[in-house]
């Protein structure tokens, strides 16, 4: 499925793959990689080519978000420094690749991101809780938040896996709630295309 959201294109390959967002020559998350031929077909349908992608930004180091990294042959990888070793070592355990029946290959990380950095015109917001190196990416001009698995349209990311931390997730949610957000583009499920602040307040209320 392909969905246009302004300048952003959302690609969804399967229930196991993360949402994949294409913004110019950048992709935010790459899915498991297990359905990559379908992804190439979708790029073609958009009049694009996966080889044209210059940057991959991973919202965190779980297999369903990073497994497809290696299929973008000309792209450099950026991920928060706390999850970067998962990508660089191809860490089968911390990426939970086994759970997806996947095999994570190691890939060089070109940029280890930190809170406040800017990449592809987006501000990096460190939001640990689902994983130590989880980030959200904020487009302040258009009030868009790419939220990875930190928060979805109707709930928060799980914190019961190794590396998860519920108290941290609460703090991260507070950090996000302080932003002006109109559109929420999460790592799984449906995006919120208007008035996302209301949806976030509701999620927070249910969570606390
Ligand atoms: Zn995850």
Image (cartoon, rainbow, N blue to C red):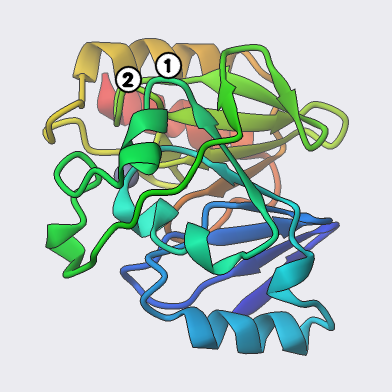
The image shows residue 48, relative to residue 155, as above or below, that is below
Residue, x 79% and y 66% (percent of image)?
52
The disc label shown at residue 172, or none: 1
Which residue, given by chain and number where applicable, does mark 2 sit on? Answer: 169
Q: Residue at x 52, y 12 (%)?
A: 175
Decide if residue 156 is in sight here.
Answer: no
**Image quadrant containing the N terminus:** bottom right
- In this image, 9 relative to 174: left or right? right
- The residue tagged with tag 1: helix, strand or loop? helix
Specify the quadrant of the image occupied by residue 204. top left
Residue 22, position in %: x, y?
A: 71, 60
Q: Residue 120, labelled with which disc?
A: none
**Is label 2 in contact with label 1 (beta carbons under 8 Å)?**
yes
Residue drawn 13% across and 60% down? Answer: 99
Image quadrant of ligand 1 equals: top left
Give the secondary structure at mark 2.
Answer: helix
Which of the 4 quarters of the picture holds residue 88?
A: top left
Residue 131 horizontal/vertical position (percent): 30, 29
Q: Is residue 75 left or right of residue 164?
A: right
Where is the C terminus found, in terms of image quarters?
top left
Q: How many marks?
A: 2
């Amino acid at each position: 499925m392909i969905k246009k959201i302004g300048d952003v294109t959302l690609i969804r390959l399967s229930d196991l793959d993360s949402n994949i967002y294409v913004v110019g020559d950048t992709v935010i998350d790459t899915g498991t990689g297990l359905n990559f031929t379908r992804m190439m077909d979708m790029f073609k349908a958009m009049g694009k080519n996966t080889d044209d992608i210059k940057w991959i930004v991973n919202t965190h180091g779980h297999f369903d978000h990073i497994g497809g990294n290696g299929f973008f042959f000309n792209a450099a990888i950026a991920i928060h420094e706390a999850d970067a070793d998962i990508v660089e070592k191809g860490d089968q355990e911390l990426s939970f690749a086994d759970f997806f029946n996947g095999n994570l290959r190691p890939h060089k990380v070109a940029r280890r991101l930190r809170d406040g950095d800017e990449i592809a015109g987006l501000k990096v917001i460190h939001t640990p809780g689902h994983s130590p190196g989880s980030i959200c990416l904020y487009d302040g001009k258009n009030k868009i938040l790419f939220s990875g698995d930190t928060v979805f349209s109707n709930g928060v990311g799980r914190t019961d896996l190794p590396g998860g931390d519920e108290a941290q997730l609460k703090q991260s949610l507070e950090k996000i709630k302080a932003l002006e957000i109109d559109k929420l583009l999460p790592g799984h499920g449906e995006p919120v295309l208007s008035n996302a602040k209301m949806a976030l307040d509701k999620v927070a209320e249910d969570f606390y």
